[in-house]
Image (cartoon, rainbow, N blue to C red):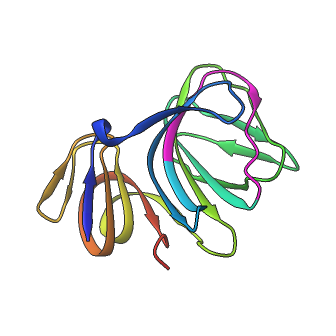
């Protein structure tokens, strides 16, 4: 299965902490429990992130200078450099000097283990989030389109790639 999703397919919703909005691109559930979710959001100011117990998170800044994630440790979120952290740990964005848009992956710990990379080409089973016009097989994607594939496909064009969603 290859599923191509465009901006009109995505759902805008408030953050759990009420301090912003997220664009939910896809979510997988089993028996009403979230297994994984792909989304993007804008971090415009310093502040606490929402807690998501039992979920592991990955954040990739896709526009803007980045910021620090401060909790039990200090992590650096910079342009096109995925950073992983636990969703059930208190964490804050600090050092936000300009709005930063990010691509987010949340996975249920112990069920799904996502591997997030930024690549210009390759082969993938999972998700391809286009950062520029991208070709996946014969399919042409616009910037910020998403392709989900449960079979290996080749892609060309700068993308955030998520492997391991269908383990």
Q: Is residue 11 above or below residue 60?
A: above
Q: Which span is picked out in magenta? A: 39-53
Look at the image and tell me in which quarter the N terminus lies.
bottom left
77 vs 13, left or right, is: right
Q: Position of residue 13 (x, y in %)?
A: 52, 33
How many marks on residues? Answer: 0
- In this rendering, the answer to whether 85 lies above or below 8 is below
Left or right, residue 120 beside residue 29: left
Percent of width and height locating residue 19: 68, 24
Residue nearest the viewer, comparing 74 with 141: 141
The residue sitting at the left extreme is 138
Query: Residue at left 16%, top 65%?
Result: 137
Outermost residue on the front side: it is 31
Q: Quadrant of residue 119?
A: bottom left
* Residue occupying the point 25% across, 66% down: 2
Residue 84: give x, y in percent of width and height.
66, 56
- 51 drawn magenta: yes
Q: What percent of the width, then of the height, locates residue 70?
A: 81, 40
Is residue 40 magenta-colored?
A: yes
């Amino acid at each position: 299965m290859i599923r191509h999703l465009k901006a009109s397919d995505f759902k805008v919703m408030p953050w759990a902490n009420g301090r912003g909005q997220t664009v939910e691109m896809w979510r997988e559930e089993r028996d009403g429990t979230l297994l994984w979710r792909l989304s993007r959001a804008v971090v415009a100011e310093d502040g606490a992130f929402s807690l998501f117990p039992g979920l592991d998170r990955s954040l990739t800044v896709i526009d803007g200078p980045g910021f620090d994630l401060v909790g039990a440790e200090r992590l650096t979120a910079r342009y096109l450099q995925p950073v992983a952290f636990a969703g059930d740990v208190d964490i804050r964005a600090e050092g936000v000097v300009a709005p930063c848009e990010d691509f987010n992956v949340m996975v249920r710990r112990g069920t799904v283990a996502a591997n997030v990379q930024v690549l210009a080409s390759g082969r993938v089973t999972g998700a391809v989030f286009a950062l520029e016009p991208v070709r996946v097989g014969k399919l042409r994607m616009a910037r910020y389109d998403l392709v989900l594939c449960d079979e290996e496909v080749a892609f060309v064009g700068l993308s955030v790639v998520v492997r391991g969603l269908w383990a």
